[in-house]
Amino acid sequence: VELALCPRLTVVDISDNKLLDPATLETLAMLPELSVLYTSNNPMREAMQHFRKKAIAALLTLNCLDGYPVEALDRRCAVAFLSGGRDAELQVRADYRQELHARTTRDR
């Protein structure tokens, strides 16, 4: 909760801290400018099914998670997966491909 007192934090490394509580993501969500997060070697990653998707959906300003970029499509897919499962995620991916195709065709 002390993190809420640091609203301008943009990069946080909580690696190797033996964090277990899934509520850690809720705490991190209180950082309105968080863009980079490192979480390696924390038991919550293994204990929390679909950790990356949950982190991307919960942390709206995140651009990089554990050294990997977070793209707009990643966020759309994570939100879809958490609300509707694998089928919803696959539908978002299909819609995205159609959007790209329509844009490419239109721009020719």
Image (cartoon, rainbow, N blue to C red):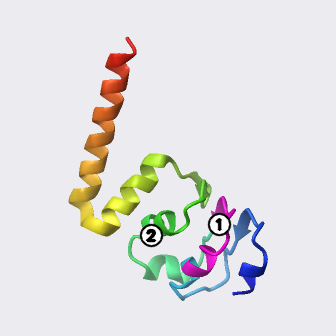
Q: Is residue 93 above or below residue 58?
A: above
- Specify the quadrant that holds the C terminus: top left
x and y percent of residue 3 in the render? 73, 80
The structure residue drawn at horizontal position 60% and vertical position 53%, both measured from the top left corner, is 63
Q: Is residue 92 left or right of residue 12?
A: left
Amino acid type, callout 1: Tyr
Between 69 and 1, which is closer to the camera in this rendering?
A: 1
Tell me residue 28's x, y (percent).
Answer: 62, 75
- Three-letter code for the amino acid on which mark 2 is drawn: Lys
Residue 2 horizontal side relative to residue 97, left or right: right
Badge 2 is on which residue? 54
**In the image, what residue occupies the spot 48% across and 48% down?**
72
Q: Are marks 1 and 2 in contact (CB under 8 Å)?
A: no
The residue lying toward the viewer, choosing from 28 and 65, is 28
Q: What range of the chain is rendered magenta?
A: 26-37
Packing grade of label 2 (10 A; few <14, some 14-19, many >=20) is: some
Q: Position of residue 11 (x, y in %)?
A: 73, 63
Q: Is residue 83 left or right of residue 33?
A: left
Query: Which residue in the structure is indicated by mark 1?
Result: 38
User: Residue at 35% of width from left, 30% of height from top?
Assistant: 100
